[in-house]
Amino acid sequence: MTEYEKATEIKLDDSERQPCEIWTRVMGYFRPVEAFNIGKKQEYAERVCFCETKALSGTAKSGNIV
């Protein structure tokens, strides 16, 4: 961390924070994760994020990239 980053770092108490609403695309449109039913929340938790660098290097788990 640089000196500038240290000087401008913002620190908040827990009382100053607010919840972050997470949205994701489901069935072609965006919805807040909080509104999902139990099954959809579990499906969301099991998702694997795409990593471009792994895909390009060939270390991705599934299939070959053409």
Image (cartoon, helix red, strand yellow):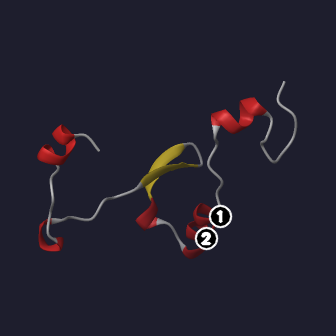
As shown in the figure, which amino acid type bears the numbered disc 1?
Answer: Glu
Q: Residue furthest front?
A: 3
In what quadrant of the picture does the N terminus appear?
top left
Q: Residue furthest top?
A: 66
Q: Residue at x 15, y 59 (%)?
A: 11
Q: Residue at x 55, y 68 (%)?
A: 41
Q: Residue at x 15, y 53 (%)?
A: 10
Which mark is nearer the camera, 1 or 2? 1
As shown in the figure, which amino acid type bears the numbered disc 2?
Answer: Gln
**x then y, percent, for residue 64:** 87, 34
Asked whether the beta carbons under mark 1 and mark 2 sit within 8 Å of each other, the answer is yes
**Label 1: how many residues lie within 10 Å, few (<14), some (14-19) or many (20+)?**
few
Q: Residue furthest right?
A: 64
Please determine whether, in this image, residue 26 is positioned above or below residue 17: above
In what quadrant of the picture does the C terminus appear?
top right
Assign a secondary structure to mark 2: helix
* Mark sitting on residue 42: 2
Q: Which residue is mark 1?
A: 46
Which one is in front, 27 or 47? 47
Which one is in front, 12 or 20? 12
Measure the C-alpha gap from mark 1 to mark 2: 6 Å
Q: Residue at x 18, y 72 (%)?
A: 14
Which one is in front, 10 or 44? 10
In this rendering, position of residue 66 left or right of residue 3 = right
**x then y, percent, for residue 55:** 73, 35
**x then y, percent, for residue 56:** 73, 29
